[in-house]
Amino acid sequence: MKINSVKLNNFRNISSMELHATDGVNVIYGENAQGKTNILEAIWLFTGCKSFRGSKDNEFIKFNEDIAKINLDFSDNVRNKKSEIIIGNKKKNVSLNGVSLRSSSELIGSFYAVIFSPSHLSLIKDGPSGRRRFLDTALCQLKPSYAEHLAGYRRALLQRNALLKDLHLSPQLYDILDSWDDQLSRYSAAVISERLKYIEILSQYSKQIYAGISENKEYFSVTYSRNDITDINISVSDLYNLELERIKNARKEDVLYKTTTIGPHRDDIDILINNVSARSFGSQGQQRSCALALKLGESEIIKKITGETPVALLDDVMSELDEKRQDYVLNHINDRQVFLTCCDPSQVLRLCGGKSFLINGGEIV
Ligand code: ATP
Ligand code: MG
């Protein structure tokens, strides 16, 4: 996967910009608040996923303007493609090769990228919701069926929770809980089964990558944090039975707390360095290396499944990594196109060469 050029109009602080990329490393550098991350964010939108900063569409439009327009000219293994996203205050128009799409999620599968930004450190540092989001986003991109199971699970969860809230008013509703337990367990089994498979492959790739980053001095592992599942090849029907039993056992507590206290919406992944929690015991550099290993692992999985090497978008990742770790990361991704932002490009350019772009006030200088 390769970007030939990206064009931005009235996107965040950028009035008008066209960037012609090189096949290797593209270093986007400049002082703080000049528009470096904004460029990566614009590129990311062509994956069909939501902003990695959690921004709403109308926040992309430059202040005091009506529409933002971004164009991407890129090539996959087979051919050259052009995509355009026009964002208005109420409406977004997306097209691929001149054909209008119903929504930007229809872009999923056309352009692959992996983004790593400082906010991804929360994968290691913060609570489980970010780790679940990481898993769900990665799987939704690769497997549309996963997105359906997850949506089904969320709908059933909402209904069951609503029922739990009303139970004290109408105890006769108690019997209906059985049918929601059944539905929830079915979706739950499908979701967990895919998550287990994904984590298994992710673990293999990330382990190797982390070993490389740490020069084999540290051991990294990632597992789905369910001690009751010992066989990761467990069948969906066995998982269903396990989930059904679990939800029945949790009923007393669920009724007490008026919410569903167990299930994939509460599960987590364990990330360990040398067999201890990276969250509790990892240094800044180790935590950053873990997050990088996970993101680069994600990239390897996309490559394996789709045959396309995703473009790597690295937002300010080199700070906090010592020179050896920086060196490893740049070597590891030298088989693909990279867009990397930083304030001081000298070290990165010394390590990897590539093309550099100085950004000042939303313009390429
Ligand atoms: P840093 O090195 O601090 O990460 P950066 O170059 O990555 O800086 P960006 O995050 O790209 O900076 O943001 C650049 C500027 O864009 C910010 O000052 C921000 O206020 C501005 N900005 C964000 N959204 C809009 C918008 N809709 N209209 C105009 N300016 C915006
Ligand atoms: Mg930035």
Image (spheres, rainbow, N blue to C red):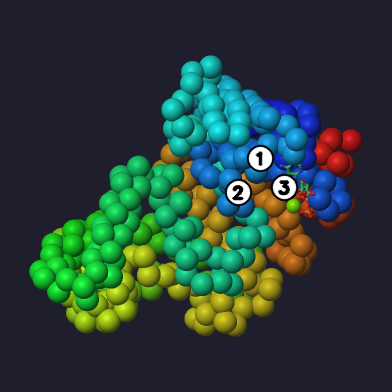
**Dot 2 corresponds to which residue?**
55
Q: Which of 205 and 111 is in front in this view?
A: 111
Vertical position of residue 362 compared to residue 217: above or below: above
**Dot 3 corresponds to which residue?**
37
The yes-or-no answer for disc 3 within 8 Å of ligand 2 is yes
In 3D space, how far apart are the residues under numbered discs 2 and 3 (Cα atoms)? 13 Å
**Dot 1 corresponds to which residue?**
60
**Few, some or many residues within 10 Å of mark 1 (<14, 14–19, 20+):** many
Q: Which amino acid does label 3 sit on?
A: Thr
Q: Can residue 131 be seen in this view?
A: yes
Vertical position of residue 268 compared to residue 41: above or below: below
Question: What residue sits 32% from the left and 56% below the top?
Answer: 154
Across and down, in percent, residue 152 comes to 28, 52
Q: Nearer the viewer, residue 156 or 358?
A: 156
Residues marked 2 and 3 touching at CB (< 8 Å): no
Question: What residue sits 42% from the left and 55% below the top?
Answer: 136
The yes-or-no answer for disc 1 within 8 Å of ligand 1 is yes
Question: What residue sits 65% from the left and 43% below the top?
Answer: 59
Across and down, in percent, residue 278 comes to 56, 76
Vertical position of residue 272 compared to residue 303: above or below: below
Q: Is residue 357 visible?
A: no
Vertical position of residue 195 compared to residue 272: above or below: above
Which type of secondary structure does the marked residue at label 3 adopt? helix
